[in-house]
Amino acid sequence: MDLSELIRNKAFLSIAGGVVLTGFFGGGIYFEMEHINKIETEVEGVRGQITSAQTLVKGTPDLVEKVVIQRETDALVAEILPNEEDINNFVRTLRTFEEGSGVRITAVKKKSLSTREKKDFDRVVYQLTFEGDAFELLSFMHQVESDERFMSVPAFKLSSSRVEGGGADRVSHKVTLDVETYVYEPKDGPAAIKIDGYDRRVDQLATEIDRRKSEILIPRYEYLGRRSRRDPFLDPRTPAEELIGPLMTVEDQMDAVAFLVRRATELRDLWADYSKLDDFQARITASSTFEEMMFTLEEDIRMVKVEGSLKHMPAERRFRAEVIPVMDELRLAMGESQYGEGPSKKLLQEASLVISDHLAVGEFEQALAAFLPLESGLDRAAEDEERVALVTSLRDLELRARTAMDFDDLGLDLGGVIVGENSVALVNGKSVSEGEMVGPELFVRSIGPDQVEFIFRGILLARYVEE
Amino acid sequence: MILINLLPEELRPQPGITPKKAAAIAAGALINASLLAWWGWLSIGVGQRVDAELEQVKEQMAGLTPQVTYHRGLETEHRVYMSRESTLDTITSERISWTQKLDQFVDLAHVGSDSSRYLVWFGNLNVTQVSDARRKDYGSLRAEGFSGTGNFANVANFLEDLEESHFARGFNPPAPPEGSQSKVDEGLVPSEVWSFPVELSLKSPEERKSDGSK
């Protein structure tokens, strides 16, 4: 059957048409499914992106906070690290440090560096050569390290030397010191993203920003100066020719100074305790001990100065650093306090009452003991109009106490009395009548049945007649 | 009676559709109709749904894109700052306050002479600070020391005090005491002097930090 016959065959045509139609529909379905799969894959992809984006965006508030903090602290970094202009002013800054410390700069050289990339930070190192003693070096280094712009000292060398000049030795160590800093010049980075309500966020994050800033700030060491210390780059030994006259050995000098230091420290502690006391009796006791110690220590210090017995440099330096300033401080503190102006009005009133009470019960020694600690300050107190009357009264009480004690010391033996028109008393085995002199400055004032009154140094005193 | 059809073959009437043929035609038609229906369902039902779904997620994504861009921008800025901070941390963590160290060194020499434990002084001082983690070299402090006494034990006293002092924080322990007696100078008191080296190597920045020497 040839092709024309096949075409004429209706059955064949029907079958062929059906198959073509099936193929067409199948193809259509296939391509449609391909399309749907593609779209679904795309949808899945976009959904994945959405999930990632949502996760990402969820972290945005935290990121905003971080960036706000970083922007604010970056401003501080810019303040701490020098910029190009600061580096250009570096030599001027060094001149200020030189004047402030006393060193003498002889050379300033910018060091060429091997490449050490620090991104936005360019390392700059200057090598300085100067002369000065250890404390001038310390002062200079302190100014470098505590400058508002970050600077550090990665290396330094010191060679000890003493230069003769102007009749006095001048210490002039040779120092080579490297000063390192990092110039902060931010390279072109991404433009800052606009953050809504930036200022408000800065306010809200103020605590966190401050905390971060304090982390960035470099802690500065507080250098308190020479503080009477010796330069450790100088030979501290004493020339033998200076050790003439009444000489103490080095050990003796060190021991003597240590003893003075200990006493000065004790005295300072005692003063601190005394200043806190309110109780009259305690103040009296403390001031008595204090004055005694102060007097003996001042005497010893005076002797040390007069005799010039401290030749050993560390001993002499310690004496000047730890004894003299303490005594100066104490004198100053005493002068500023009521102590320097004599006893206060309140103290005088209290003392007056205490002494009167002792006298009333015949406790003359206790009365005198209460008076003695005040005695040295009474002249100063008497210069004050408000206290002069109290001082006079206290001195009168003291006189009474002393007179009474002297009267006791006379040891009068009162044998008996005969009271009548002409009363007679038997004193020290002798009969005396009223108005009669018993001894120097001692008169009989009156004779009673149970007591005899005497006038001793103008003060009335009584003695009871023993049964 | 026998009838004979004398018409030629092509003019003779065709026989009717047999049941088999009818079944085959019906099956073919059914298959094609099903395929057409499936295609229609896919195209109109599923296809449009997924298209709409795609459109929807694209719109959703488009809504998120500015926020993502904003986030990415912030992230880039954050990374730049982090990098700067890290550099700054490195710079500052390596820094040593030599004012403090030298001040403590002066204290040490001074206190010892006051307490008569030793009387020492130094002819020179050489301080270098480097950062070579590979060779574990972070710098050193070297000095030529002198002890004004005939008793070498005073050098040991000094080195002992040095090791226990605040000054030694951040340094590795010094080498055991060694030295030699210098020339005796009768013109000075004390006349005998021992010379000794002081050599201290710096610890790494991390160790210094944990030492509390910063």
Image (spheres, helix red, strand yellow):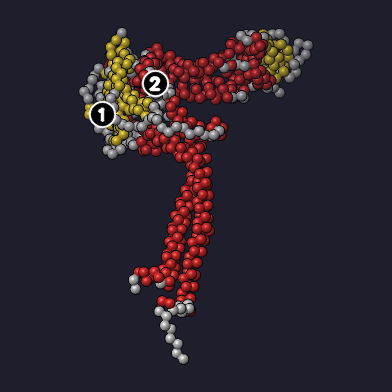
Q: Identify which amino acid the numbered label 2 is placed on.
A: Asp
- Residue at screen point 30% across, 18% down: A108
Q: Spatial distance from mark 2 to mark 1, Cα to Cα?
A: 43 Å
Chain on which label 1 sits: B
The answer to whether residue A214 is seen in the rendering is: no
Viewport quadrant of the C terminus of chain B: top left
| Viewer-proximal residue among A74 and B208 | A74
Residue B196: give its label.
1
Do the residues at discs 2 and 1 belong to one chain? no
Residue B36 place in picture, x, y as percent: 49, 64
- Residue at screen point 51% across, 15% down: A332
Q: Is residue B136 above or below residue A86?
A: below
| Viewer-proximal residue among B137 and B51 | B51
- Residue at screen point 35% across, 69% down: A3
Give the side of residue A463 with respect to residue A116, left or right.
Answer: right
Q: Which residue position holds label 2?
A: A86
Residue A408: give its label.
none
